Image: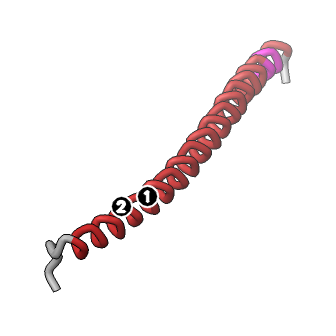
Amino acid sequence: MTDGTESIVLEHLRRIRASQERTELDLSELKSRVSGLEHVAGQMLAMLGTMNQRMDRFDERLGRIERRLDLADA
């Protein structure tokens, strides 16, 4: 190869390497963000479970009240 050709190839390789490094940084950031979203989704599911438990207790209490007041259908 001539000096000009080698120089062009090296320049392209440097640009490819720089582009690859930027891509790796972006991918690392995306992984971090997805991990955060997964954490939040897990917390939301736990909260939903807690809310469902509370609603079940309210339903039981309301049923008892209706039975005591003879408001419930058989």
- Residue 33, placed above or below residue 50: above
Q: What residue do we see at 50% from left, 50% from top?
A: 47
Can you give x and y, in whole percent of width and height, for residue 60 in the image?
A: 35, 70
In the picture provided, is 54 more to the left or to the right than 25? left
Q: Mainly helix, strand or loop, the magenta region?
A: helix
Q: Nearer the viewer, residue 4 or 46?
A: 46
- SS class of the residue under badge 1? helix
Q: Nearer the viewer, residue 44 or 30?
A: 44
Q: CA distance from mark 2 to mark 1?
A: 6 Å
Q: Nearer the viewer, residue 55 or 44?
A: 55
Query: For residue 64, which quarter of the picture?
Result: bottom left
Which quadrant holds the C terminus? bottom left
Mark 2 residue crowding within 10 angstroms, few (<14) / some (14–19) / many (20+): few
Q: Are marks 2 and 1 in contact (CB under 8 Å)?
A: yes
- SS class of the residue under badge 2? helix
Q: Outermost residue toward the bottom?
A: 74
Query: For residue 22, which quarter of the picture?
Result: top right
Q: Which residue has dot 2 on it?
A: 58
Can you give x and y, in whole percent of width and height, for residue 49 in the image?
A: 49, 59
- The amino acid on which the numbered mark 2 sits, given as a three-letter code, is Phe
Which region of the structure is painted magenta?
Answer: 5-10
In the picture provided, is 60 more to the left or to the right than 19? left
Q: Which residue has dot 1 on it?
A: 54
- Residue 28, placed above or below residue 69: above
Q: What residue do we see at 23% from left, 76% from top?
A: 67
Query: For residue 6, which quarter of the picture?
Result: top right
In the picture provided, is 28 more to the left or to the right than 39? right
